[in-house]
Image: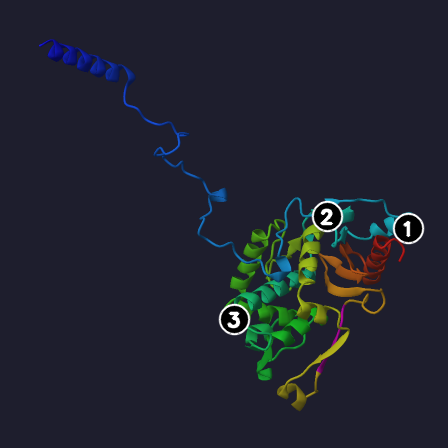
Amino acid sequence: MKFTILSAIILIHLVVLGLLLGPCRPGPDAKGGDVVDEAVEEPDGGDSESEPESAGTGSSQHYGAGFYADALSPLPDALEAASKTCRAGIVVDWTSRSVLWKKQDTAAYPIASLTKMMTVLLVMESLEQDQELTLQTPVRVTKQANGVGGRQVWLDPRDGSFTIDQLLKCTLVFSANDAAYLLGQFLGGGDHRTFVERMNSRSRQLGLTHFTFHNANGLPEGTKKLENKGCTRELSYLAGSLLEYPQVLKWSQTRLESLTSEFRERGKGATMLTTTNKLLGKVEGVNGMKTGFTNAAGWCMAATCERDGRVVIVVVTGCKQADKRNDLAKGLISWAYKGD
C-alpha cells in the first residue's frame, strides 16, 4: 500500500514537471536536430538552374560603371586646341582599362557608321552561337539591300549570294551600307527590323545604356532621318571587344581588297574596296576599327592601336572635317603612347 502511494506521488510530480517545462525541442543550432531551411533569394530574381546568356568572345566582360578607371592627364596645348574640333571623344588604355582623356564621353550623339561595330559584334556572336553558321555561309542579295543608299558596293540580286565573310569585308574595309544592311536582314530572319531590335536589346544586356539604333548601317533612317546615337565611352568598349576576333582584325586593318561575282565579271569586273581608315599604314600599330560620317554626326572615328603589347583606343565624334578628325586621332594616339 505504501509502495503504491509513493509511486503515485512520484508519477504526479513527473507529470507536473513535464507540464511546466514543455516539450523538449532542440534549437536551430543544436546538432542532430531537424532544422527547417530558410528560403534563399536568387540575385536579381534569377533562376539558379538557368545559364547566363553567352556574351561571345568579344564581350567576355560586360561593360559597367566600373569597367574603366580614370587615369586622366591634361593634353598638351596644341592637342587640347585640336580637340575642340570634335564634339566628344575619349582615349582609353584598353590593356589597363584606364581612361586617359575624355570629352563629353557619356553624352549620346549621332554616331553614323560607327554603328557598324555593333552590327559586326552581333555577326561574330551569331557565328559563335549558331553551329549552322560559318564565315562561308552564303547570303542571298535582296531587293531591299539593293535599295540602300550612301556608301555602298552596289549589291544586286543578280550577284546571287555573297558569303558572310565577304559581307564583313565590305562592311569593315569599305564601310558599305548595303553590306551591313544585308547582314542585319539575314540575321534577322529576313526582317531588318528584327535585327535592329536585337541590336538595342543586346546593347542593354551588355550594360551599354546610351545606344539607340534605328538600322544596322548608320544612315539617317526613314522620312524622319533618325540618327543612331551612342557615347564615345561605350563605343570604345565595342571597338575593344571586336579586337578579340581574328577575322574582324583581318578586315579592319586591310587597306585594299576587291569584291567580285560572276555577274560583275560579265560586266565591269570586280569592285575595288579601299579602306576608309586613313591612319592605316601611316600611324604605327593602328589596326582598326571604324570611321563614319553623316551631316548630323559629323566626321567620326574609332581607332585601335597596339604597340609592344599595349592597346590604345581613341574615339572621336562630331569632327567638322575629315582631315581634322584624322589629325586629332593621330595626335591622341601619339600622346597616349607618350610621344612614341
Callout 1 secondary element: helix
Q: Which amino acid type is marked by label 3?
A: Gln
Dot 1 amino acid type: Ala
Residue 31's x, y, as percent?
39, 32
Circle 2 residues within 10 Å: few <14, some 14–19, many ≥20:
many
Does the magenta run of residues contain 272?
Answer: yes
Task: Evaluate if marks 3 and 2 touch, with contact meaning CB atoms under 8 Å apart.
Answer: no
Q: Can you tell which quarter of the image residue 202 is in?
A: bottom right
The amino acid sitting under disc 2 is Asp
The foreground one among 26 and 334 is 26
The tag on residue 105 is 2
Depicted 244 relative to depicted 152: above or below:
above
Task: Measure the alpha-carbon separation of dots 3 and 2.
Answer: 37 Å
- Where residue 262 appears, as percent x and y from the top left, is 63, 88
Q: Tell me the residue at 59%/66% (across/down).
A: 123
Residue 78: which disc?
1
- Residue 76 is at least partly visible in this image: yes
State how far apart marks 2 and 1 are (Cα): 20 Å
Q: Residue 178: horizontal and vertical position, in percent?
A: 63, 71
Graded by Cα atoms within 10 Å as few (under 14), some (14 to 19) or many (20 or more), the crowding at tag 3 reads few
Q: Is the magenta region chiefly helix, strand or loop?
A: strand
- Residue bearing mark 3: 131
Tell me the quarter of the image containing the C terminus. Answer: bottom right
Q: Which residues are magenta?
A: 271-276
Along the polypeptide, which appears first: circle 2 or circle 1?
1
State which mark lies toward you, 3 or 2.
Answer: 3
* Percent position of residue 167, x then y: 63, 74
Counting residues from the N terminus, which is met first, the one under dot 1 or under dot 3? 1
